[in-house]
Image: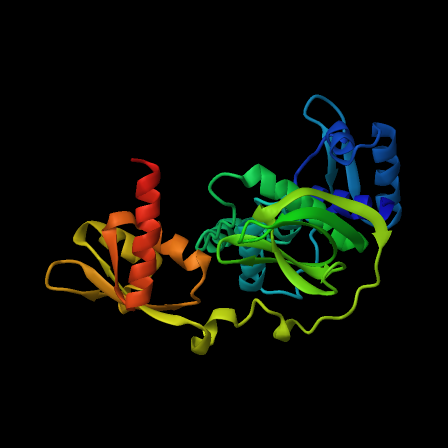
Amino acid sequence: MKIDRLLSIVILLINRPLIQAKELADMFEVSVRTIYRDIESINEAGIPVVTYQGAGGGIGLMEGYRLDRNLLTQRELADIFTGLQSISSYGGGAHTLLMEKISSVIPPSQTAAFRHKTNQLIVDFSPWGLQGIIEERLTLLKKALEENVLVTFEYVNAGGASSQRTVEPYTLVHKGQAWYLYGFCRGRRDFRMFKLHRMKSLAAGSDSFERQELPLHELPWGDGWKDIRNTTRILLRFLPAGRHLAEDYFDIAELQQDERGGYTVAVHYPEDNWLYGFLLSFGTLMEVLEPEHVRHRLGELAAGVAAKYR
């Protein structure tokens, strides 16, 4: 839309001393003539745009022009900027432009202090590997969410069963190092969580749906594992060689050092396929001490793995 492009151009001009008309045209996929018409519209709106001719020229704003920044403090702006940095690895185009908008309201004399604040905390949601695949799915799902259109995909559940799904997408959730789609499954006639890693042949359709309001405080990802009644207490012991793993995965305050230089820790997890895969991932550097049925099941699974490689 033209109004979105005009606002984006204004923000870019506020944040940069000069910018070439061709660069703006390439950025917004329009002609240079269209950019100059946009500049005229911006000038007519009372925003002072100046064109500098020559080799070092370009388009810029009158020196000293700044957005009114009274609504937010610099600390609040830094917190917003930090949050945007954390998710910019996924569909970063829109987030990058928004970060430029925030940077534009910081006076030059305070830029260094602002950058210091925004570098104090960095959270990177991107996974090790598969980043391109997940980013493609997130981009498609974000567009479907914005347009309120159905999505279809083949879904493989934790038990390996595959099924075709048609879903009304409601929100994207990042939980426990993975991305999920929460939406209304037309086939199951109920809301479901779908892990993006388990989707195949994801596509957005043309059929729209009427979105209903969801009470965010009642949604399923909020308290799942907090209810200790739905979990099993498991006592783990890490060998001295595996102490770094214990420190990576568990709160150091919960770890108890034993007389042999290792760690023991008591954890509460739902007893499911994920749990056994998680425990097996520590290999021989960790031993389950309690309960006995978990030790027994883990031994069966480990023996089965060993049998495959004999």
Front-most of 239 and 145? 239
- Total numbered badges shown on the rendered structure: 0
Q: Is residue 97 visible?
A: no
* Position in image of residue 141 (x %, y %): 70, 49
Q: Residue at x 63, y 53 (%)?
A: 102
* Position in image of residue 30 (x %, y %): 83, 32
Q: Residue at x 52, y 72 (%)?
A: 223
Work out which residue is located at the far top of the displayed protein and give it. Answer: 55
* Position in image of residue 303 (x %, y %): 30, 48
Front-most of 97 and 123? 123
Work out which residue is located at the far left of the displayed protein and give it. Answer: 259
Q: Is residue 139 left or right of residue 82?
A: right
Front-most of 245 and 14? 245
Q: Is residue 41 left or right of residue 232?
A: right
Tell me the colour scheme of the image.
rainbow
For the C terminus, the image quarter is top left
* Position in image of residue 27 (x %, y %): 73, 34
For the N terminus, the image quarter is top right
Q: Residue at x 83, y 59 (%)?
A: 209
Location of residue 48 by image quarter: top right
Give above or below for 33 relative to 162. Answer: above
Q: Residue at x 39, y 56 (%)?
A: 276
